[in-house]
Amino acid sequence: MDTTSLIHKVLSGKASETERADLEEWIGRSEANKTEYNDIRLLWESGKDTDRSPADAHFFVANV
């Protein structure tokens, strides 16, 4: 399993104890891994923000 899938599995609460331990070990290996985890976690948490209405979203549309 790739790391991003493992992170999503842990964040969704579907990971086993072994998978959670594997992720913790991976995060501890380097600052880059910790940063990657935190970035994905922030995206995950912001995606769960159900109180925002579509009118609150800001999109950049490039002229093509």
Image (cartoon, grey):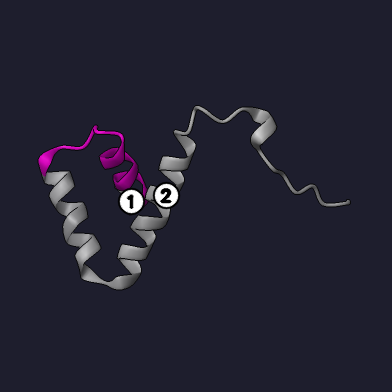
Rendered location of residue 54, percent (x, y)? 65, 29
The secondary element bearing badge 2 is classed as helix
Position of 35 compared to 61: left or right? left
What mark, if any, has residue 42 been given in the picture? 2
Give residue 47's position: percent from left, percent from top: 48, 37
Question: Relative to residue 9, is residue 64 drawn left or right?
Answer: right
Residue 9 located within the stretch drawn in magenta: yes
Under mark 1, the amino acid is Asp
Q: Total label count?
A: 2
| Span highlighted in magenta in the image | 2-17
* The stretch drawn in magenta includes residue 5: yes
**Looking at the picture, how far across and down is residue 26, in whole percent?**
22, 61
Residue 10, percent from left and from top = 26, 41
Which residue position is annotated with label 1? Answer: 2
Q: Quadrant of residue 15?
A: top left
Q: Nearer the viewer, residue 15 or 57?
A: 57
Q: CA distance from mark 2 to mark 1?
A: 19 Å
Q: Residue at x 30, y 40 (%)?
A: 11
Of all residues, the one furthest to the right in this rendering is 64
- Residue 8, located in which quarter of the rendered image? top left
